Amino acid sequence: GAVVSQHPSRVICKSGTSVKIECRSLDFQATTMFWYRQFPKQSLMLMATSNEGSKATYEQGVEKDKFLINHASLTLSTLTVTSAHPEDSSFYICSAKTGESYEQYFGPGTRLTVT
Amino acid sequence: AQSVTQLGSHVSVSEGALVLLRCNYSSSVPPYLFWYVQYPNQGLQLLLKYTSAATLVKGINDFEAEFKKSETSFHLTKPSAHMSDAAEYFCAVSGDGGFKTIFGAGTRLFVKA
C-alpha cells in the first residue's frame, strides 16, 4: 500500500519550453502533496506544499510563477516548470500524505534536463 | 523551528561490520523522526520512524534506531553491513505544524568487500 508514482521518470526539454511532471497516489487519497528538488549529492529542498483544492504554499525563494503546482484531485498533483532554463535541471521528487499523519510517501523522482 | 544534523557526510564500513549513522535533531515540540534510504536516481524509501511510542524503533532490513530525548539523537544502526546497504541515508524530523518534514544533509554509506 501507499504507493506514489511520478511521470515521466526522465525528461529532456529545450530551454524556453515548459514541462509538466505528474505525481499520483495510487492506492490512497492524498490530502497533501509536497514537491522537492534535489541537486546532485545534496539533500531534498522543499519547494511547495499543496492541499487538494487549494493554492500551493511555496517556500521562500521558490518562484511560484515559474513552478506551477496544481492539486486538482485527491490522487493527482502536477508541477509545471515554465520557460525552463538549464539551471532548472534537477531531480524533482514528490511525496504525499493523508489525514493527520506526519508520514510522507515518496515518488520515484523525475530527472529533468534542460538543454 | 526544527532542524536535523547528520554527522558525517560519508561513512565507510566493511561488509559484516556494524553500521552507525548519526543524527541529532532540534525541535521545540515532540518530534516525529524518520530515516530514509535513497539509491541513485530513485526516490526515498522509509527505513523506520519514531512517532512517540517505543524509543527503540526497528525497521526494514535489520536497521534500527533509538530515540534519546536527553541527547536529542536518533542514530541509525545495523549489526552487519551488506554490500546492498551502500546508499544515501537521510534523517528527517517533522511535527512542528504544517506537516513539513525537514531533512538532514544526508550520509553516504560505503560498504567495502
Image (spheres, rainbow, N blue to C red):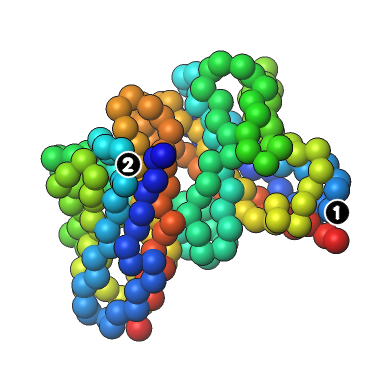
Q: From the viewer's perspective, is B67 left or right of B29?
A: right
Question: How far apart are the two marked residues, 2 and 1, measured between alpha carbons?
Answer: 39 Å
Q: Secondary structure at mark 1?
A: strand
Q: Tag 2's secondary structure?
A: loop
Q: Count neighbours of disc 1 (C-alpha within 10 A) and say few if under 14, some if 14 to 19, many if 20 or more.
A: some
Which sits in the foreground, A10 or B75?
Answer: A10
Residue A61, given in percent of the width and then of the height, sits at 32, 53
Give the residue number, with chain letter if any, for mark 1: B14
Residue occupying the point 18% across, 51% down: A70
Please state the horizontal and vertical placement of residue A105, each as a whole percent of the image: 41, 42
Indicate the quadrant containing the N terminus of chain A: top left, top right, bottom left or bottom right.
top left
- The residue under label 2 is A27
Task: Please provide percent x and percent y for residue A27.
Answer: 32, 41
Please say if the residues under marks 2 and 1 sit with CB atoms less than 8 Å apart. Answer: no
Image position of B26 with respect to B89: above or below:
above
Q: Residue at x 70, y 56 (%)?
A: B84
Please give the chain letter of the residue carrying mark 2.
Answer: A
Q: Amino acid at mark 2?
A: Asp
Q: Is residue A46 left or right of residue A41?
A: left
Residue B60 figure quarter: top right
Chain of the residue under label 1: B
Name the residue located 56 percent from the left edge and 43 percent from the top edge. B36
